[in-house]
Amino acid sequence: MIFQNNGKDLLEQIFKQYYAEQDDNRYDSVTMLIDFYENDHIPYIRQKLNREPQSNDDFPYTFIPITRHIIKKKSLVYKKEPTRDMSESYLDWTKEKDHQMKEAERQTRLVPVVAMRPYIVAGKDYFKYEIVRHFYGICDPLDKQSFKAIMYKLSVDHHDSYDELWAYWDDERFVIVNSNGVPIKEQEAFGGVADMKNPYGEIPFAFLRFNNIIDDCWVGGAYDIVNANWNIDIAMTDLNWLHRYASFKQPIVIANASDLGKIKWGYDQAVFMTPNDNPQGQAVEFDLLDLEANFENAFYLIQKQMDMISMMSGVNLNWELKGAPSGFSLVVKNMDLLMDWEDDIGFCRQWERSLFEKEKIVLKTDAKRTFADKEISVNFADVKFPVDPKETRDQVDWEIENNYSTGLDYMATQDQDATEDELKSKRDENKKYNDEYAGTTPLTVINT
């Protein structure tokens, strides 16, 4: 095994063996998933159309960011912040956690697995979280949910000394290496440690995924969405290309084969043809052809492709808005999405437990402190759809009358950041104000 070699070239051998053992096609495929999510579609459209990159390329490349749209629509677990029944100390240390968890959920829907690490910036008394969605890893044969070593690229754009740096972690080592696998001297300058030893005794990453592992720890990823998005982009690009020629006609040239190479034509170019270019003196003929493209059918096909991949993802696309749907109709319409959300909560509870274990290790090692909490308790918020105001009032009145809730509970839904004392104070102010202006109209109150 690569971790049993104690020679001086150990890290170089590890680095080279990583490249030898890992499937570079998988790394490239994850790159494609990320590019589509980040709306960098054009290089892939160009590749499919066999067009070379050009600085003055005015080809009408067209893409639709449906990958990003579907991923964000499906990410419901952390859309609203969950409630953690934890000590005040824990909540203070993790005050930035929910914001990062929302992004981690989206990224985990995109790629097969995401690595997430809590860390403490010097001088701060709370965790920050590093999300790594693109990395090489060696699966742990004893725990397929985890990795026994990972390596990922660091961001060092425009650095004078290094064009590329990688971070390597295993249970014993944490090393920053260059593109050749050689440890750099300035370890601490790039977040490493001087002795290149892992201070935590284990990889401080929790590994997040939305799939149960059976055979391969790399299972999952939004490949179906990205592949459909790619095909839709090609169709939209072809449609726009065809629209140009159909709108302004297709130029055609009739000449000897030897003449064609002398004729320059294309978008935004005039076509010059002279009989003198023809060795036989034969005139070159130019004409316009009407392609009569059926754009309606072409767009219908594109729309159906978008509907199909959205439907299979549990997401509905609204091509036109016809009135305001009720809360119940929205629930029925999004039933598949809600069922997926219920399944996803189970995975997210695993994430919370894994991250909690890493948070305890990092806090003990870097801050020399411990949490009073022995385990994490988290309640995820329910998914709620907008309902008719009258339905809301009737529901709130019924809950209060039957002692399922109080007026303060309803006020808390309108101001989630307010404390109970603040809500009570606001309620008393409202009562005093309403009693004072009882029997007056809203306009009268405004003008007083």
Image (tube, grey):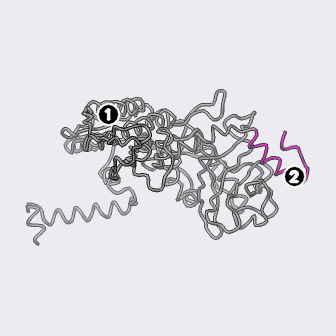
Pick out the residue farthest to the front: 280
Quarter of the image for residue 184 reads bottom right
- Is label 2 in contact with label 1 (beta carbons under 8 Å)? no
Pick out the residue farthest to the right: 7
In which quadrant of the rendered image does the C terminus lie? bottom left
Residue 162: x percent and y percent?
70, 63
Residue 258: x percent and y percent?
44, 40
Pick out the residue farthest to the bottom: 448
The numbered mark at residue 9 is 2
Q: Amino acid at mark 2?
A: Asp
The residue depicted at 63 percent of the width and 38 percent of the height is 26
In which quadrant of the rendered image does the N terminus lie? top right
* Measured Cα–Cα span from mark 2 to mark 1: 56 Å
Q: Decide: few, some or many residues near mark 1? Use Cα within 10 Å; few <14, some 14-19, many ≥20.
A: some
In the image shown, does 369 or 203 lie closer to the viewer? 203
Magenta span: helix, strand or loop, mainly?
helix
Residue 144: x percent and y percent?
69, 34
Tag 1 residue: 303
The residue depicted at 76 percent of the width and 40 percent of the height is 20
Q: Amino acid at mark 1?
A: Gln
Q: Which is more N-terminal, label 1 or label 2?
A: 2
Residue 331, compared with residue 5, is above or below; it is above
Residue 160, compared with residue 198, is above or below; it is below
In the image shown, does 74 or 380 lie closer to the viewer? 74
Left or right of residue 119: residue 277: left
Left or right of residue 256: residue 26: right
The residue depicted at 59 percent of the width and 44 percent of the height is 114
Residue 193: x percent and y percent?
76, 62
In the image shown, does 351 or 168 lie closer to the viewer? 168
Q: Which residues are magenta?
A: 1-20
